């Protein structure tokens, strides 16, 4: 690993990371600030929401309207979607460009002529990707915890909150690995940001459609979102072993394949 390259990449992505942190923190804080008002008018809100089609509520992530009465249930429905979708967008955009940008910015020749191997380049950039995803998740988790503590009306399970945050981190890491893998398959040196964002949204759309229509529920297994359990208010809520294996196994495999492809890839200079 090259510490010079690592520090350079961290500085290079610092502004973007900061903006994403601020946006997600604001979204979480503003949404949770509506919880006390929601409780005051719960009968009216629930009556209004009961008029909505069940499919529309499930698309929003609401399986049971009563779940919204719990501060953790309100958080998981309204805020986890910010981190699970926006966090995954952040991860895949960063990962899909962290190797590829040296080619389309015409800096690959300079980098590759330095006394540093491709393995060192790959490992250094993977470290940057991993640290960025962990940092944005830590900030979001801290913002979520503070919001829950400030606006709670009754005790909630901190253990369930941390499990929910772990699922979010695992999901973001998987999309980071997906973006990295896709970038090593690209033959022409050009940004793939739009494609990467579209991929996250497609996977989320597949997941929501599988929840709305029972007849197509099985297609949900094609989406990584399916394996991130959001039912935080369930008394039996825990980290499922097979889902854990899925996230870690898929992420590790994609990173390994990305490494093998990058080592052998023709780099455009």
Image (cartoon, grey):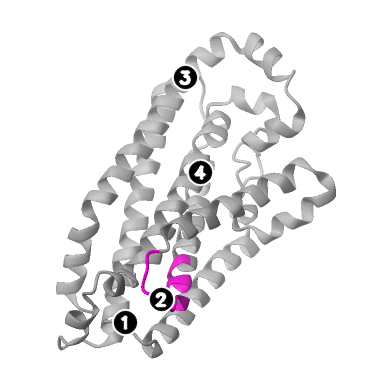
Q: Is residue 185 magenta?
A: yes
x%, y% of residue 153?
50, 19
Which callout, 1 or 4, points at the residue further toward the start of the chain?
4
Cα distance in 3D space between marks 4 and 2: 46 Å
In the rendering, which numbered label is found on residue 159?
4
In the rendering, which numbered label is found on residue 34?
3
The residue that label 2 is drawn on is: 188
Cα distance in 3D space between marks 1 and 2: 8 Å
Which callout, 3 or 1, points at the residue further toward the start of the chain?
3
Q: Residue at x 31, y 61 (%)?
A: 131
Cα distance in 3D space between marks 3 and 1: 51 Å
Check contact, mark 2 vs mark 3: CB within 8 A. no
In the rendered view of the protein, which quadrant contains the N terminus? Answer: bottom left
> Which residue occupies the foreground of this view, 21 or 161?
21
Of circles 1 and 4, the one toward us is 1
Cα distance in 3D space between marks 1 and 4: 48 Å
Q: Residue at x 50, y 69 (%)?
A: 251
Of circles 4 and 2, the one toward us is 2
Q: From which residue to which does the magenta span run? A: 179-191
């Amino acid at each position: 690993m090259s510490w010079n390259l690592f520090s350079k990449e961290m500085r290079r992505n610092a502004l973007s990371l900061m903006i994403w942190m601020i946006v997600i923190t604001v979204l979480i804080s503003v949404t949770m600030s509506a919880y006390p008002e929601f409780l005051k008018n719960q009968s009216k809100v629930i009556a209004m929401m009961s008029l909505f089609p069940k499919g529309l509520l499930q698309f929003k992530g609401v399986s049971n309207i009563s779940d919204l009465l719990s501060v953790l249930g309100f958080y998981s429905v309204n805020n986890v979607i910010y981190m699970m979708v926006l966090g995954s967008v952040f991860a895949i955009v960063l990962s899909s460009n962290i190797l590829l940008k040296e080619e389309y910015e015409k800096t690959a020749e300079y980098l590759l002529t330095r006394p540093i191997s491709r393995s060192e380049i790959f490992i250094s950039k993977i470290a940057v990707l991993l640290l960025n995803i962990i940092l944005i998740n830590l900030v979001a988790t801290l913002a979520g915890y503070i919001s829950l503590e400030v606006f709670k009306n009754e005790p909630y399970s901190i253990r369930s909150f941390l499990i929910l945050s772990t699922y979010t981190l695992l999901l973001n890491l998987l999309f980071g690995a997906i973006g990295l893998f896709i970038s090593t398959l690209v033959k022409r040196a050009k940004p793939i940001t739009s494609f990467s964002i579209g991929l996250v949204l497609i996977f989320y759309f597949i997941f929501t459609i599988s929840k709305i229509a029972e007849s197509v529920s099985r297609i949900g297994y094609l989406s990584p979102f399916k394996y991130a359990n959001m039912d935080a208010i369930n008394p039996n809520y825990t980290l499922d072993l097979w889902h854990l294996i899925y996230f870690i196994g898929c992420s590790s495999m994609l990173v390994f394949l990305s490494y093998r492809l990058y080592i052998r890839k023709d780099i455009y200079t």
